[in-house]
Amino acid sequence: MRTIWIDADACPKVIKDIVFRASGRTQTPVTMVANQYLPKPASSLIRCVQVEKGFDAADHYLVQHSQPGDLVVTQDIPLAAELIDKKVAALNPRGELYTLDNVRQRLNIRDFLDTMRASGEHTGGPAAFSDKDKQRFANALDRWLAKKV
């Protein structure tokens, strides 16, 4: 059975709640991975894995344990690239499904902005999380769930 994984340290609570409701509705297992304790709903479908603190410890766990056909909710672009290479779907909290085509472009933009920030340029941050983002995520999750047979 396919699993939905959540890169949970930085995932907005509202996104986790959407995933939890979808899990109950579709009986899809969910695993949250974080380097800190996270509360979870009382559901046998939802589990939490607390990894040791350390740079990319949760990312390494997700790459090692997710399987082709699974879905990982993450906003970490390098992690998404690794997952896609492994045939694991990656969806960001704003509802964008990463693909072979767009993840390389996102990595290039990320690297460029890192270079700009390192040179002292103020590039700003992402836009505030909106209701439209939440709706796009829910729709993308529903599309992924509908594909599983």
Image (spheres, helix red, strand yellow):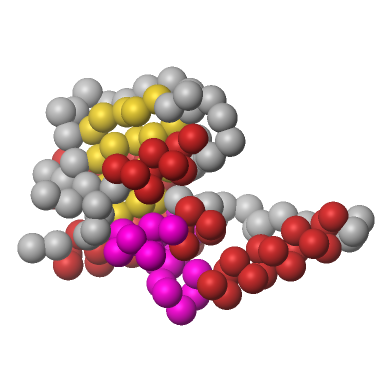
Pinpoint residue 133: horizontal percent, then vertical percent. 48, 59
> Above or below — where is 74 with respect to 91?
above
Residue lying farthest left? 149
Tell me, yes or no, if residue 137 can be seen here: no
* Left or right of 54 on screen, residue 96: left
Stretch in magenta: 82-103
Residue at the spot 38% in from the left edge and 64% down from the top edge? 84
* Left or right of 128 on screen, residue 145: left
Instruction: Specify the quadrant of the image occupied by residue 97.
Output: bottom left
Is residue 110 or residue 30 the one in the foreground?
Answer: 110
> Above or below — where is 32 with respect to 76?
above
* Left or right of 21 on screen, residue 140: right
Number of residue marks: 0
Tell me, yes or no, if residue 43 can be seen here: yes
Residue at the spot 30% in from the left edge and 55% down from the top edge? 71
Residue lying farthest bottom? 101
Pinpoint residue 22: horizontal percent, then vertical percent. 23, 48
Is residue 104 or residue 128 the one in the foreground?
Answer: 104
* Left or right of 123 on screen, residue 60: left
The answer to whether residue 89 is magenta is: yes
Instruction: Specify the quadrant of the image occupied by residue 95.
Output: bottom left
The answer to whether residue 48 is magenta is: no
Residue at the spot 16% in from the left edge and 46% down from the top edge? 28
Pinpoint residue 7: horizontal percent, then vertical percent. 43, 42
> Above or below — where is 3 with respect to 95?
above
Pinpoint residue 147: horizontal percent, then vertical percent. 17, 67
Name the quadrant of the C terminus: bottom left
